[in-house]
Image: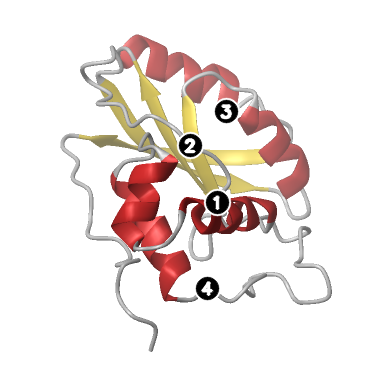
Amino acid sequence: MSADEGVEGGWPGHSASKLDGVDRAIIAELLRDGRMSMRTLAERVHISRANAYARLTRLMDDGVITGFTAELAPHKAGLGTSAYVSVTIEQNSWRTVSARLRSIPYVEHFAMVGGDYDVLVLVRTPDNAALRQVVLERIQDVPGVRATHTWLVFDEARGRGTDWGARES
């Protein structure tokens, strides 16, 4: 959610809907396997198919679940070079910079951050030559970008993340 996409009737960053244990179990199961059938999902969380459909529809309508995607192994998919690029931008240029970053090939993810830099960008390319082109010719060419700093990724691992199946506290 961007800073200008506040929750209706609330402040940005606050939950739009309260998730109960069944909602959290649905999320946990779908994060494990987003391709499972509704029947399997209902069985795993011990609810009826009708309830599973209704809850999934609500979670999607509320924007809690925003879509379903495939996870790729970047190296096996031909993206052998990954880097984090920190970007320093001019004050009040976030909207312009973020709109342009969305359109640059190989930019996988970016976020406005606090600290020494303003934006952190994850770039995955086939090779170093493509990375060079993305950083030096595309990102640095964005109006509002003042400077970049690039860190090559040598190895990656996924963290534990949130335990969606855990009971609420």
Q: Earlier in the sequence, mark 2 or mark 4?
A: 4
Q: Position of residue 87 (x, y in %)?
A: 53, 44
Residue of label 1: 65
Q: Earlier in the sequence, mark 1 or mark 3?
A: 1
Q: CA distance from mark 2 to mark 3?
A: 28 Å
Neighbor class of circle 2 (other Cα within 10 Å; few <14, some 14-19, many 20+) is few
Q: CA distance from mark 2 to mark 1?
A: 8 Å
Q: Secondary structure at mark 4?
A: loop
Q: CA distance from mark 1 to mark 3?
A: 30 Å
Instruction: Give the image quarter of residue 84.
Output: top left
**Residue at x 38%, y 29% (from the top left corner):** 70
Q: Earlier in the sequence, mark 2 or mark 3?
A: 2
Residue of label 2: 68
- The C terminus, quarter of image: bottom left
**Residue at x 67%, y 70% (from the top left corner):** 16
Q: Secondary structure at mark 1?
A: loop
Disc assigned to residue 19: 4
Judge by depth and name the residue closer to the eye, 77 or 71. Answer: 71
Q: CA distance from mark 3 to mark 4?
A: 38 Å
Instruction: Give the image quarter of residue 85.
Output: top left
Mark 2–mark 1 CB contact (< 8 Å):
yes
- Residue lying farthest to the right in this orientation: 9
Task: Left or right? Give the position of 153 relative to 133.
Answer: left
Q: Position of residue 45 (x, y in %)?
A: 34, 61
